[in-house]
Image: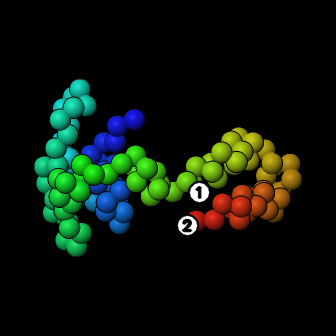
Amino acid sequence: MTLTLVQRIKTLRTALTDEDFIRNVRVEVNYDGSNEVLKEWNHPSITRPSDSELAAVTQADYDKIQKDWIWKRCEEYPIVVDQLDDIYHNGIDSWKAKIKAVKDKYPKN
């Protein structure tokens, strides 16, 4: 898989939020997905990465910064319909205990 420009930027500047990509950072992409360009960088406190920094980002770099705890939790949580059924049949405390067990197993980094 080839990393997108946004993924490369997020790897280098992990403090950026999705909101920053709406307000402070603008990436343009052709309709066919080629020719990504960092058009605008107006972030007040985070410096713009250089072209050489962006080119050096690898898939392994990107994978390291991903919040894998989110995906691990999502894989173990029951689907919402089953969670609601559990609450109905066993009460909210039972549901909380099951969810807490998953959260404890995969804590936030």
Q: Which label's residue is closer to the chain start, 2 or 1?
A: 1
Percent position (x, y) of residue 87? Answer: 79, 52
Question: Would you place residue 32 above or below residue 19 in this image?
Answer: above
**Residue beneath the point at 31% across and 62% down:** 13
**Residue beneath the point at 33% across and 56% down:** 10
Q: 83 or 78, which is in the foreground?
A: 78
Percent position (x, y) of residue 90? Answer: 86, 53
Q: Amino acid at mark 1?
A: Trp
Q: Is residue 93 left or right of residue 20?
A: right
Question: Would you place residue 41 above or below residue 32 in this image?
Answer: below
Give the residue at mark 2: 109
Percent position (x, y) of residue 86? Answer: 80, 48
- The quadrant the N terminus occupies is top left
**Residue beneath the point at 71% across and 61% down:** 105
Percent position (x, y) of residue 83? Answer: 74, 47
Q: 35 or 77, which is in the foreground?
A: 35
**Residue beneath the point at 40% across and 51% down:** 62
**10 Å crowding of disc 1: few (<14), some (14-19), many (20+):** some
Q: Is residue 18 left or right of residue 51?
A: right
Q: Secondary structure at mark 2?
A: loop
Q: Quadrant of residue 102?
A: bottom right
Give the residue at mark 1: 69
The reply to whether dot 2 and dot 1 touch (C-beta < 8 Å) is yes
Q: Secondary structure at mark 1?
A: helix
